[in-house]
Image: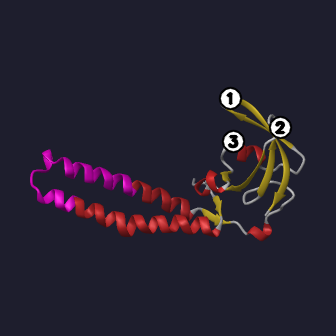
Amino acid sequence: MAQIRYYTEEGLQKLKDELHDMKAVQRPSISRQIAEARDKGDLSENAEYDAAKEAQGLLELKISKLEDIIGNARIVDESQVDSSKAFILSKVKIKNIANDRELSYTLVSENEADLKAGKISVESPIGKGLLGKEVGEIAEIKVPNGTLKFELLEISR
């Protein structure tokens, strides 16, 4: 059974645009490559044909996975997000207890994560550790190097 994931309208639209590109641009391009390679003769020793067929298989797999993700996606109504606890679409300000460094992130779905833009996935160790926490709580997050402690300073939408 497919997993339901939550997205912003913007994030879901990005996925739909990516799917459209795969179907309308990449798929016809690979079909042309296959046709060109087929026109070159003996397919048993045609590396271009084999490469194009492999690329086609990978693309069809990506399309299938993306269609499944989009089919099970739900848009989060930002007006309904409870800002008393950290959930998806919450903007959180946290403090690393070890070094007193403050960080701000928006908790988003895995496909929307972009660390440079301050968006971390709710599937990441830090994202998982913050989910459901309230302001003032300490999140103990296990990472490969040990355990990090973050104090949740602020939650907003």
- Amino acid marked by disc 1: Asn
Q: How far apart are labels 2 and 1 at the CA level?
A: 15 Å
- Amino acid marked by disc 3: Pro
Q: Residue at x 88, y 51 (%)?
A: 135
Q: Residue at x 75, y 68 (%)?
A: 78
**Disc 3 packing (10 Å; few <14; some 14–19; many ≥20):** some
Q: Is residue 151 above or below residue 52?
A: above
Position of residue 44 in the picture relative to residue 157 (left or right) = left
Position of residue 155 in the picture relative to residue 144 (left or right) = right
Which one is earlier in the sequence, the residue at label 2 or at label 1? 2
- Residue 53 drawn in magenta: yes
Which one is earlier in the sequence, the residue at label 3 or at label 2? 2
Residue 118 image point, x, y percent: 68, 54
* Badge number at residue 97: 2
- Residue 68 drawn in magenta: no
The residue singled out by tag 3 in the image is 125
Q: Residue at x 68, y 29 (%)?
A: 145
Q: Residue at x 83, y 57 (%)?
A: 155
- Amino acid marked by disc 2: Ile
Residue 127 image point, x, y percent: 71, 47
Position of residue 13 in the picture relative to residue 74 (left or right) = left
Depth order, front residue of 46/93: 93
Q: Mark 2 or mark 1: which is in front?
A: 2
| Residue segment shown in magenta | 34-60
Q: Mark 3 or mark 2: which is in front?
A: 2
Q: Is residue 142 above or below residue 45?
A: above
Kindly check if marks 3 and 2 are in contact, taking CB atoms under 8 A apart as contact: no
Residue 140 image point, x, y percent: 80, 37
The residue singled out by tag 1 in the image is 145
